[in-house]
Image: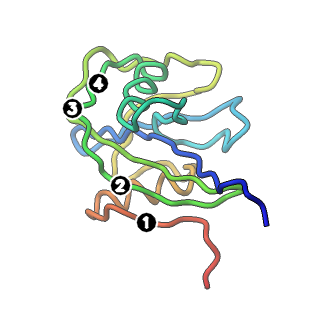
Amino acid sequence: MSNERFKLIPEAHLLLFMENKTLLLLRKNTGYEDGKYSVVAGHFEGNETAREAMVREAFEEAGIKIYPKDLVLAHITHRKHLDERVSFFFTTATWEGAITNMEPKKCADLRWFPIDSMPDNMVPYVRDAIEQSLKGNIYSEFGWKEK
């Protein structure tokens, strides 16, 4: 039996909504789900809170300034793919600056999509989290085999 503790990878995701639309980005050159739409997101860097990670990622990827106090937890997904991750989905009604693709080498498209007609080519757990959050469900599990 190993003495090493189990490790879980935390991620922060930003759900922005405006006029029945949601902001999505098209992944490219990332090595994960390239060619599929997702949301502004990223891993925690360590020694930062979930909200701090979200603030940093929003600026790095979309060029907008958001404040931790304005972030509302919309959903949490405990998911499994090759490893286990916990994805925190935050939303906010306010931000500063124009939404801009700050990472064109990793993002082929950044724009608003109607919530009722999101693209078919979405990262599956992200689509699920958006749908779950819109239903008011705060927690879900994704990618686990049925027991």
Residue 75 - label: 2
> Mark 1 and mark 3: span between their CA atoms?
24 Å
Judge from the rendering whether residue 135 lies leftward or rightward of residue 8; answer left or right: left
Three-letter residue code for mark 2 = His
Residue 66 - label: 4
Percent coordinates x, y for residue 44 in the rendering: 51, 34
Three-letter residue code for mark 3 = Lys
**Residue drawn where x is 46% and y is 27% of the image:** 57
**Residue drawn where x is 37% and y is 35% of the image:** 112
Judge from the rendering whether residue 83 lies leftward or rightward of residue 130; answer left or right: right
Q: Earlier in the sequence, mark 1 or mark 4?
A: 4
Disc 3 + disc 2, Cβ < 8 Å: no
In the image, 54 versus 47, the foreground residue is 47
Q: Earlier in the sequence, mark 1 or mark 3?
A: 3
In the image, 112 versus 145, the foreground residue is 145
> Mark 1 and mark 4: span between their CA atoms?
26 Å
Task: Name the residue that disc number 3 marks.
Answer: 69
Q: Is residue 49 above or below residue 115?
A: above
Task: Name the residue that disc number 1 marks.
Answer: 140
